[in-house]
Image (cartoon, rainbow, N blue to C red):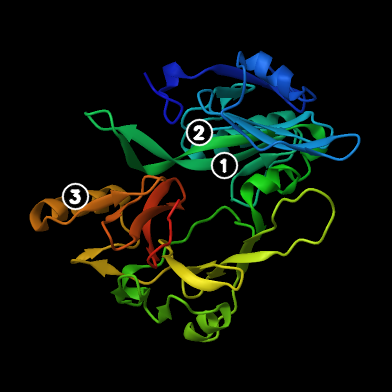
Amino acid sequence: MGGWWLKEPGERLQWVLDPLVGVGPLRFGMSASEVEDALGRERPDVSTVHGWGEPVVRMGWQEYLEEGVAAFYGQDGRLVAVAVGGLGGPQVRAGDVELIGRVPSEVRADVLRLAGGQRVAVRTNGDGDPEVAAWGVSLGTVQELGRTPEGWAQRRDRMVTDALLVAAELADDPRAAEPVVRRRGVRDEDRNPGVWPVVLDFERPIWEWTPLEGVGPLRFGMGPEQVSAALGGEVPAARRGRLPWTVGRGPRQWCLEEDRFDHAGVSAHYWGDVPTLAAVTVHGRTGPQVAFHGIDLIGRQGSAIDAALLQLAEIDEIGLRLNCAGDLGPDELNMYVRATRAGDAVISEARFCTAGWEEHG
């Protein structure tokens, strides 16, 4: 039987979307205890619902891993959104369209057909996937997982759909609304128009990697200005950080965590109150090529690289390590081969880290 991380179609709950009203047994406006009762649960697996003030204001989200859903609560502590996971979440039907766990381009075509018949507008959300305000639906994707013959999780080379389903008050911009935006992080990113171009191999520069010290012209310990200068003065196309959640209304210091450089095809990851470079992600679609023991790590099928690393481990007796996201890398070198979307497909990218950086995916 599949666990919370992966369910086959026949193992999934079957839910129906009631646009802007609810999904399955969940109705927008429910309290957290009513959601638990509807799901037959005593408590969530993960809770980040916070309360403060007089009267108490509650906002946040709770995750139910076995069901594959997350419930979001607004300032009055009432349900305003439900996120349905693409791997283990319920199968959600909108009209005659199954939304969850399918090939993204196929779902897009079905959504356009259904929306056209109902004469409602379909737009593209910031992740490049369909969004229908009239239904309170914002689609997304996740990398598909399968099982090895031994029962272990195994990454596959394609994406499948998940969804954010919201009440009317969040429908204008579901992914930027409170409290959903807090789960996604504080971001300043260009909107994806729904295309994922991939740079050809011969157009990629070649970068050298010095384990635990740096990759290409970037050295761990650099500040943001030094990183930009090392990349020829390129200005970050987007920045991501965190604004600590605190009780009350006092000032909060925004902390820089990531700069994305689209021309170079890399992201710089920082740590510390005074941000210093601690990791670099080389983007799979646009980044430079980096090799490890003759294995090109960037822009390839992830399953092929995983197989090559496993073969290398058997031949050269090197150790391999998985991070908590399932990314594979050589032991003690703090490098992990990751995955990025290229339309319906998935291709490889890599993150190179300094010693002490804990890679959580």
Q: Is residue 170 left or right of residue 209?
A: right
Quarter-of-image position of residue 187? bottom right
Cα distance between the residues tagged 1 and 3: 31 Å
Relative to 110, residue 221 above or below: below
Asked if one can make out residue 2 in the rendered structure from this viewpoint, the answer is yes
Q: Is residue 301 left or right of residue 221?
A: left
Element marked by disc 1: strand
Q: Is residue 51 left or right of residue 230?
A: right
Mark 1: few/some/many CA within 10 Å (<14, 14-19, 20+) = many
Cα distance between the residues tagged 1 and 2: 9 Å
What's the mark number on residue 310? Answer: 3
Q: Nearer the viewer, residue 192 or 80?
A: 80
The amino acid beneath tag 3 is: Leu
Residue tagged by mark 1? 140
Mark 3: few/some/many CA within 10 Å (<14, 14-19, 20+) = some
Kindly check if marks 1 and 2 are in contact, taking CB atoms under 8 A apart as contact: yes
Kindly check if marks 1 and 3 are in contact, taking CB atoms under 8 A apart as contact: no
The amino acid beneath tag 2 is: Gly
Q: N-terminal of the two: label 3 or label 2?
A: 2
Residue 319 placed where, x, y %? 20, 53
Q: Nearer the viewer, residue 72 or 56?
A: 56
Quarter-of-image position of residue 168? top right
Q: Residue at x 39, y 49 (%)?
A: 346
Q: Nearer the viewer, residue 62 or 291?
A: 62
Asked if one can make out residue 135 in the rendered structure from this viewpoint, the answer is no
Q: Residue at x 49, y 79 (%)?
A: 222
What's the mark number on residue 86? Answer: 2
